[in-house]
Structure formats: C-alpha cells, structure tokens
Image (cartoon, rainbow, N blue to C red):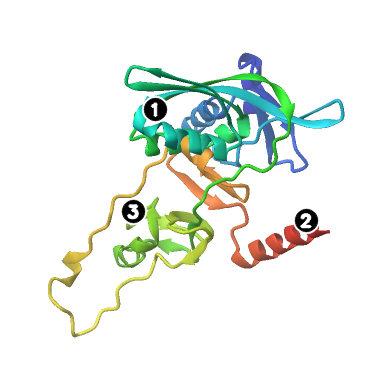
Amino acid sequence: RDRLMKETEKNLALRVEDSDNSDSFLVYGRGVLHLGILIETMRREGYELTVGQPQVIVKEINGKKCEPYENLVVDVPQEFSGKVIDMVTQRKGELLVMESKGEMQHLEFEIPSRGLIGLRSNMLTNTAGEAVMAHRFTEYKPWKGPIPGRNNGVLITKNNGTTTAYSIDKLQDRGSFFVDPGEEVYVGQIIAEHIKPGDLIVNATEGKKLTNMRASGSDDSVRIIPKIQMTLEECMEYIQQDECIEVTPKNIRLRKTILDEDERKKFQKMLKTEEVG
C-alpha cells in the first residue's frame, strides 16, 4: 500500500483506492500500458502481487450507465480490411471512415474502450502484423451491452508438481502451452490455451511409466513445441473475469482466481442463480 501511495505522488494519472479486502487495492490508470509499466517496475523492485482483469471506469450521467468511447484509426493492407472491420464490429465498434491510400486502407471507428482490451494482439495475428492502429478517448456514452471476450478456454493443471515432456506431448493437440517441461506448476494454474471454448482440467505432471519392454528410441520422438511467451500487457489483455496474473520477480504466471476446482464450480453456480434471480 505504501509503495502504491508513494507512486501517486509523482505519477499524476494514477489513483489508488482501498477495497473491502485489506490486501487488495483498486488502481486507476490511463490504460493497460500505464498499469503495466507500474506493475513491471514494482516486480523488478522485488514485490509479489496478483493482478485482476483490467476494467473500464463506468460513470452515471443523467441517471444512465455510461462508458468511455474511443476513436480507433487502423491503416491496413486492402486484403485484410474485411477481417479488421469484422473484428471491430464484433466488439461493438462502428465504422465511420473508409478511404484508400495507395495499397493501404484507412479505417476509422468509434468503439467502446472495453472493446479495445485484447484487440491489439488479435489484430496483429489476423493481419500478419501489417496493421497500424492508434486510438484516443473521445467521450462518455451510454453502455453498449455485453462485448464478447476470448473465444477459447484454457487448460488448468489439477495437481502440484513439475511438468513433464511426456504429459505435455500427450496434451499438445488440446492447446498451445504457456509452460515448458520441467517447470513447477500448482493447482489452478493456467498452463495452456484450449483449442475449443470451455476450460479443461489436465494432468501435466505425469511421468512415463518405466517397464522392461521399451522400444528403443521412442523417447527421442517427443517433439515439444516451444511455449508461448506473453508480455505483462498481453497477459492483462488475455485474462477473463475469473482469472488473474501472478507477478513475482522471477515469474509471470496466469491462474484462476479461485484455485480449487470444486470451489470454482460452487461460485459459478452461485453467480448463475443470482443472475436468474
């Protein structure tokens, strides 16, 4: 708490508030990058902390729930313009300007700030890294309704231990991994992105059973795809409501907020009954 308060003295765009829990704080900043720089600085100073999903600041104006909107400008090669328009409109963006500038297509959108969280990495993936995007805040407007988050679920480890090449090799067709063999994992840690929607509990710490009958050379055929390296900003954009990032001086890991699987299910049921009620 003292470290955050000290930061507010010189970092004027930052605001820190106490929450119901004495160990957690609400930190308000100028976007994911601004918060990312603060977290990275604290991490290098030796602090350990858990970071939840970034949220936009909602205001009530004339009795209506309002959220911030931004002007998004994208310059992209013409063959990718359809993909870009599709991605932005799915996130409740509206196309305002569409012009050709030589080989490039110049697109301008009005989009809720919520829709921009996680858009950059998807944009670069779908345009082969060719898109150039910039955005700036315009005004607060009425809430636009739910915006779809990440399509894919995640693979969650079900026990503590060290990951093995044998286990990861068997699970590689289920998703893309964030860990390499030989890394320490714990219950509730997110170790991979599932190829389908919905989360999957997996065992990544199982060793190969040794028997007398072993085909020689069969272990050499294990080919592990290198893990996906994500920056802190990419992690903040990637996580969903029930997930968080564990930041330590040595590691940045993704995990479920509630580590125990049974507790998570109970909590999800409780949320559903509240929504129905």
Coordinates of residue 67 in the picture (x, y in percent): 71, 30
Towards the viewer: 15 or 272: 272
Task: Give how far across and how far down residue 11 sits, in percent.
Answer: 61, 17
Q: Residues within 10 Å of mark 3 (few under 14, many from 20)?
A: some
> Which residue was labeled with disc 2?
275
Image quarter in which the N terminus is found: top right
Q: Residue at 56% across / 40% down in the picture?
A: 90
> To which residue does mark 1 refer?
131
Q: Which residue is mark 3?
A: 180
Q: Earlier in the sequence, mark 3 or mark 1?
A: 1
Q: How many marks?
A: 3
Cα distance, mark 1 to mark 2? 39 Å
Marks 3, 1: nearer the viewer? 1
Q: Nearer the viewer, residue 152 or 253?
A: 152
Name the foreground residue: 256 vs 185. Answer: 256
Position above or below: 241 against 64: below
Q: Nearer the viewer, mark 1 or mark 2?
A: 1
In the rendered structure, the answer to whether residue 160 lies left or right of residue 268 reads: left
Amino acid type of the residue that numbered disc 3 sits on in the rendered structure: Asp
Give the spatial CA distance, label 2 vs label 3.
39 Å
**Residue 58, located in which quarter of the rendered image?**
top right
x 33%, y 63%: residue: 164
Where 89 falls versus 12 (above or below)? below
